[in-house]
Image: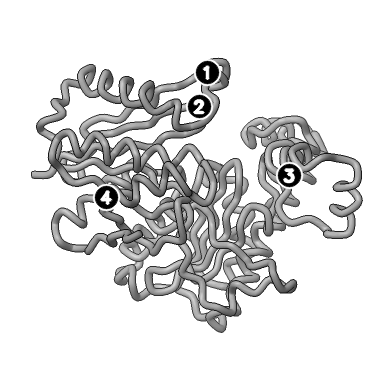
Amino acid sequence: MALILAINPGSTSTKIAVYENEKCLWKDSIEHSYEEMAAYKDIYEQYPMRVKIIKEFLKKHGTSEDKLSAIVGRGGPATDFKSGAYRMNKELADLMVTNPINNHVSLLGGIIAFNMAEELGIPSFIYDPVSINEFPEIAKISGLKGIERKSAGHFLNIRAGGRKVATEIGKDFNDVTLLAAHLGGGITVAILHKGKVIDLISDDEGPMSPERTGGLPLRQVIDLAEKYDKKTLNRIIRGDGGVVSYLGITDMREVEKRIEAGDKEAKLIFDAMVYQVSNWLSYLAPIVNGKIDGIFLTGGIAYSERFTNAVKEKLNFLGPVFIVPGENELESLALGALRVLRGEEEANIYKD
């Protein structure tokens, strides 16, 4: 029996769960106010607070730390990773602190997991971190020498969703080819081929989302850059763009309520997001000459029948469309660590 603690730190939350093998014993989400988090100058200053809260919630739920078999944390953008599990070690923990790709809060998942596990003498892992890079060389070409397409996105949920779809169609995950869209505050569109994401349309390249612009006409972006500084422009693209720029809201459920009330602009923007997601999914199909086993939609917006049915209508010609709603990140982390503990999967080892 394996008892696994999964940790997923977010910008205003710390989500944790304890799994006994495949069974979730409990999960909880600790919310942090904007004012609370603004008091920290960087993510690393948050470390003592987050560890303290995690230990308090373990006690609250009656889970003894010394009963844990392993701890797994969300993997942040520390380097170009391979897909799957990484066994945390000092070299990787140090990299996450001293020289990551960027200081994203998800880095704390691996750091917390490593330090807590070291105290207990048990293994720690990260799983499917946000900066996996398994693109073939041709996929990295952007169109301008010196600018390379980057591989960064919702790998954890995309690969976990791919596993579920493979099981549903009776195939091994490493034998299927699937188109995938993670539909959340940001949208990632990807193609999974034999267990690897071989191309991915990041949230600054592809469809607009509730709060991000997606790809924009470059010449008009150049005009915007003359009006705003870099920080403001980044905020426009990632935070103030997409649906919120048109309708003033990011909650797609509220958009649907407006549509039901007869709001024509809300319907146009909703339909435009369906249009863009569908187009970018089909854009990836030629990479494998159209030979796919299916398409799946995941993330929070995948709970919307209006949205998923509209995408299905556009893409059924490519293959069956599956719905795997929600983020399922804690489950994905725990089950990934469990496969390593059982010897069903081998963990990667980072070496400096």
The quadrant of the picture occupied by the N terminus is top left
Disc 1 + disc 3, Cβ < 8 Å: no
Q: Position of residue 258 (x, y in %)?
A: 73, 31
Tag 2's secondary structure?
Answer: loop
Closer to viewer: mark 4 or mark 2: 4
Q: Quadrant of the C terminus?
A: bottom left
Residue depicted at x 28% and y 33%: 17
Q: Is residue 200 above or below residue 128?
A: below
Q: To which quarter of the image does residue 202 belong?
A: bottom right
Residue furthest to the bottom: 289
Callouts 2 and 1 close, C-beta under 8 Å = yes
Circle 2 sits on which residue?
Answer: 12
Q: CA distance from mark 1 to mark 3?
A: 24 Å
Left or right of 269 on screen, residue 349 = left
The mark that comes first in sequence, 1 or 4, is 1
The percent coordinates of residue 292 (x first, y second) are: 49, 75
Q: Which residue position is annotated with label 4?
A: 89
Q: Closer to the observer: label 1 or label 4?
A: 4
Callout 2 amino acid: Thr
What residue is shown with label 1?
33
- Disc 4 from disc 2: Cα separation: 27 Å
Determine the CA span between mark 2 and mark 1.
6 Å
